[in-house]
Amino acid sequence: MTDATNNAVEEAKTKWDEIVEYVVDPELWFQVAGGAIRIVLILLVSFLIIRIARRVITQFFANKRRGPFRITQRREATLNKLVLNTLTYVVYFMAFIMILETFNFEVGALLAGAGVAGLAIGFGAQNLVRDIISGFFIIFEDQFSVGDYIQTSGVEGFVEEVGLRTTKVKAWTGEVHILPNGNVTQVTNFSMHNSVAFVDVSIAYEEDIDAAEKVISELLQELPARYESMLNVPELLGIQTLGASDVVMRIICEVPPMEHWAMARVIRKEVKNRLDAEGIEIPFPRMVMYSRDEAANVEVNDEKQGGAS
């Protein structure tokens, strides 16, 4: 073997010995074990902080219900979920930074680089900034909250979640629509105030309208005792329209938010049953048919009777 080969072999052996010595060094394994324990402790403390914070935030909003500065239940649900999500993100981010420090990363340089990259990305993420700003004003102005029934951007349904960037709306058929907050330009909120149920009742022209009004008015006085959702006695406004074959009367009733559809169905059923019991007819389409043969016989008979006379 040449001298160069011998030197290479010796260097390889030396490096291998150094690696073996480094691997079997107890101090290394103490450092690895210490780092692993520290990471586990960071994760455990993070989970504990989040869990304790959830209880504290929930208790805080529960105390707000009983305090002098009360907030509505719908706004409480929105703020509760938003605060919990924000807190979770912050705690996980801090845990991630502490884990990086465990591996001896230069966190300061990393954050500085992330700041510069974030500034550069921000110029190209104008829609994201718009969504976040819009989400802030939606929450701050209480335009809608979790549980509200809204209509916006061609979507209608119950609000599942309000975040800083997106809003989740669940349609009554089960679909969940995720809308960027920047696209929420006009909102119709059906849950902020009481609703009004209105029902149109048709009465045949042949019936006594005054008697029908009396029967309906007596029925409406009985309904609030049966249905708690009726906040007051339904009101019979009178004749709404004169149709081709019916007289249409309108009934209105104030109900809690989003109860107007259910109460309208109840009023229709109760009015139908009472009118049937009183023998007052609700008009329905009728068809009169004439036979050509019968019409011809009638004309012949009319001519014969005219000639005889």
Image (cartoon, rainbow, N blue to C red):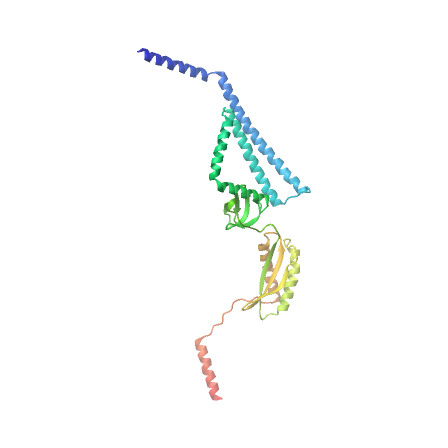
Q: Is residue 33 above or below residue 53?
A: above
Q: Nearer the viewer, residue 258 or 14?
A: 14
Whether residue 76 can be seen here: yes
Q: Residue at x 47, y 33 (%)?
A: 117
Most extreme residue toward the left is 1
Whether residue 165 can be seen here: no
Q: Residue at x 59, y 31 (%)?
A: 49
Q: Nearer the viewer, residue 296 or 209?
A: 209
Q: Is residue 11 above or below residue 73?
A: above
Classify residue 6 by image quadrant. Answer: top left
Classify residue 235 by image quadrant. Answer: bottom right
Q: Position of residue 91 (x, y in %)?
A: 56, 32
Left or right, residue 17 beside residue 87: left
Most extreme residue toward the bottom is 309
Q: Position of residue 105 (x, y in %)?
A: 49, 25
Q: Is residue 53 above or below residue 214?
A: above
